[in-house]
């Protein structure tokens, strides 16, 4: 236990990308402050099942509870991975690995954080994206993709993230959104929610992207009002590799990514720093 009074803290991180040795070293050093701390891992742990397992097993051995949601990198059927499963079968396989390790996934009942700052329902979400964060001047996905191919900014998902058995990634996204909406509506009233998703549930964080066309691979307009419709304490996400806090309609959005070494080397903050979600960093303890 640390000398901070006990009771635990709920932390978050994402985009560990441990295919990079420097990032693997960050995970090796990652520790809770107390035996009661939880950790939310918001996707992009690694590309191979072996690496993903290593990270989640390491962290599950240190934190009281680890909650994981998939990023696009976990869902790639990468040529370097011995596991050749695609789409839903790959996701289901990852969920099975998590069950073995005691890690919570979007397929489990939502756990409730009862420590300081709680009670708060923690809802891990897997929603994917549907190309509806279109670049300005484009009215359809086809126009958006044509523009992206013109600039050369096309997400690798187009080659490696297979939607099988769905006909498209957007069809998979729509199915996930519908099922998740149903589950969130069942959360008992009065309990605030920490929503954890690889992508922001609202478009505003993508406004600062260097290449605005990349936003097509960053979320869906189908969740545009979720932070207002549900009692959201904090929306935790990653994927953009732009760690920061923003506020939308009075709701805190927290981008918790580590990112690639070439990105974090430029930042003032030390890499691999966990972000405290509950109690909020501005609330003290
Ligand atoms: Fe990432
Ligand atoms: Fe990502």
Image (spheres, helix red, strand yellow):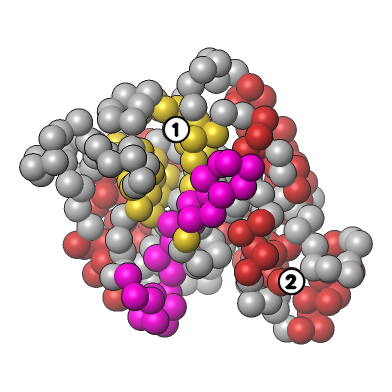
Q: Give the alpha-carbon distance from disc 1 to disc 2, as whole Å.
A: 31 Å
Vertical arrangement, residue 31 with respect to residue 3, above or below: below
Kind of element beneath mark 1: strand
Residue located 42% across and 27% down the image: 120
Badge 1 local density, few (<14 within 10 Å), some, or many (20+)? Answer: many
Residue located 66% across and 34% down the image: 228
Label located before the other in sequence (1 or 2): 1
Left or right: where does residue 129 sit relative to residue 200? right
Judge whether residue 81 can be spotted in this image.
no
275 vs 128, nearest the viewer: 275
Vertical arrangement, residue 238 with respect to residue 110, above or below: below
Residue at the disc numbered 1: 122
Was residue 267 drawn as part of the magenta stretch in this picture? yes
Please report the bounds of the magenta region as a residue range: 245-269
Position of the N terminus by quadrant: top left
Vertical arrangement, residue 185 with respect to residue 23, above or below: above
Residue 213 numbered tag: 2
Residue 124 image position (x, y, % from top left) = 49, 38
């Amino acid at each position: 236990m640390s000398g901070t009074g006990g009771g635990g803290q709920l932390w978050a991180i994402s985009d560990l990308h441990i295919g990079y040795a420097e990032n693997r070293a960050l995970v090796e050093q990652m520790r809770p402050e107390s035996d009661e701390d939880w950790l939310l891992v918001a996707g992009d742990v690694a590309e191979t099942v072996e690496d993903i397992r290593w990270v989640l097993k390491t962290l599950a051995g240190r934190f009281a509870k680890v909650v994981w949601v998939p990023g696009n990198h976990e869902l790639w059927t990468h040529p370097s991975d011995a596991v050749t499963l695609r789409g839903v079968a790959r996701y289901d396989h990852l969920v099975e690995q998590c069950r073995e390790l005691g890690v919570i996934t979007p397929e489990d009942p939502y756990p409730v954080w009862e420590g300081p700052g709680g009670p708060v329902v923690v809802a891990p979400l897997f929603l994917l994206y549907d190309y509806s964060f279109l670049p300005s001047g484009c009215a359809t996905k086809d126009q958006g993709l044509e523009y992206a191919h013109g600039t050369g900014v096309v997400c690798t998902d187009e080659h490696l993230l297979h939607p099988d058995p769905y006909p498209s990634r957007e069809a998979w996204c729509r199915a996930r959104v519908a099922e998740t909406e149903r589950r969130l509506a069942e959360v008992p009233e009065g309990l605030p929610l920490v929503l954890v998703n690889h992508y922001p549930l609202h478009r505003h964080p993508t406004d600062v992207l260097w290449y605005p066309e990349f936003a097509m691979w960053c979320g869906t307009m189908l969740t545009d009002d979720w932070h207002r419709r549900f009692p959201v304490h904090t929306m935790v996400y990653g994927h953009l590799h732009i760690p920061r806090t923003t506020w939308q309609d009075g709701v805190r959005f927290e981008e918790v990514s580590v990112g690639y070494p070439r990105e974090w080397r430029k930042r003032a903050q030390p890499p691999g720093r966990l972000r405290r979600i509950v109690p909020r960093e501005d609330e003290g303890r």
